[in-house]
Amino acid sequence: MAKQGSERIKDALDHIKRAFAGHGPSTDGDKAKGATWDWLETHKDQKGIAALISLGGFRGIKALQDESKTEMRHFQRGYLLILRTLGGKSDAEVKIVKARLVSTSGQNARIETENMKTEIRSVYTKWADKKKKKETPRIYGEPILAPSFQYANQLQKQSLAPALKRASELLTQAWVGIMRINLNTLEKKRYVAYFGAVDQTRYNKVKETLKAVHDVICSKNITLYYRGIDAPTDPGEDDTPQFLLDRGANTLGPSTAYGYVYSTVQKEKEWHVFLGRAFFEDASRHGRDSLSGVIIHEMTHLLKQTQDHRYGDDNCIALAKEVGGPAKAVENADSYEYYCESFQSKVTTTFG
Ligand SMILES: [Zn+2]
């Protein structure tokens, strides 16, 4: 008699678990079975899936006597089930696999069974890796938003993670560029345009600054504060961190600036950046003078005590050409910003 759909699924689940026996941690089988079960619970098409994994038995007297063939079928059903669920395959894709299983089964049943077990484990492992990746925080793009961001609008809030992600990409490209100045004339030109003639000490300083900023952007320890037009002015809602208040920082209310930081008051492994009206109203998402550029600019102040000798792309390029200019360029925040932003065609971040 044909089995009920739910029975067939239960059998298949048990065989998913059994596929792990003797392989890896003993709990993996339970996890794979549990995850498949959870998938079924949240998708509610058990009836359709039960039919999908139905393979029938083997006909003929010989087959009926051959336990290992029956065993092989069990694992084949488990494989189809896990493919359809954790494997993310569609009904149509599973049907193709099913057709293959039906047409190739019978020979060397024992070997086939071992193959099926391996396939089941592989589907689970891929699923588990993907899940783990999802749970692992991304390398960049996840700033901590201070309470004042409740006064920012949705679009403003949503731009911050991509802005950090893009900053990280710009810095990566800038790093690749700066490492190639002796191999690539275009990269050398670009470096010279922003930082002047190559001198080992200055070159090292630029490299260290780019690296320091990149490391911190990847650290996920950057807290951003909203100081745009709707920033709270009531001292009761001041979210300036205490260690800055203790040192006399006054950050309450909107600021007209792009951003500002307190580079002389540091707390280990915490980075605090205040974003003003110009950041939200004037900075672009892509291109020059971007949100990412502002963040890079502010981070160079915070991490390497850079100055604001000159503002603006053209002025930075002019500075590098002046007598004594390169020494100033390598400690000028905007020079870093525009150098990094000059790599914009190489980054891929899009804003939602
Ligand atoms: Zn500045």
Image: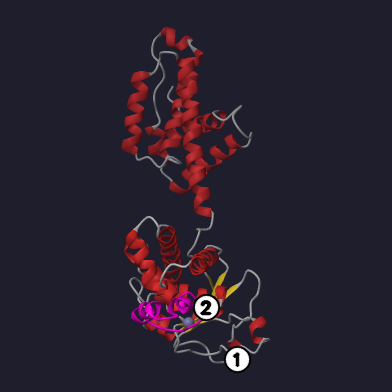
Residue labelled 2 has its Cβ within 8 Å of some atom of ligand 1: yes
Residue positioned most to the front: 323
Q: In the rendered structure, which amino acid carries the disc numbered 2?
A: Thr
Q: Secondary structure at mark 1?
A: helix
Q: Nearer the viewer, residue 279 or 231?
A: 279
The residue range painted magenta reads 306-333
Query: Would residue 347 be found to the left or right of residue 125 on screen?
Result: left
Q: Residue at x 33, y 20 (%)?
A: 103
Q: Which mark is residue 194?
A: none
Mark 1, residue position: 235
Q: In the rendered structure, which amino acid carries the disc numbered 1?
A: Pro
Q: CA distance from mark 1 to mark 2?
A: 30 Å
Q: Position of residue 154 (x, y in %)?
A: 42, 75
Mark 2, residue position: 306
Quarter of the image for residue 158 reads bottom left
Q: Residue at x 42, y 72 (%)?
A: 195
Q: Is residue 319 magenta?
A: yes
Q: Earlier in the sequence, mark 1 or mark 2?
A: 1
Can residue 136 be seen here? The reply is yes
Quarter of the image for residue 94 reads top left
Q: Nearer the viewer, residue 229 or 19?
A: 229
- Placement of the N terminus among the 4 image quadrants: top left
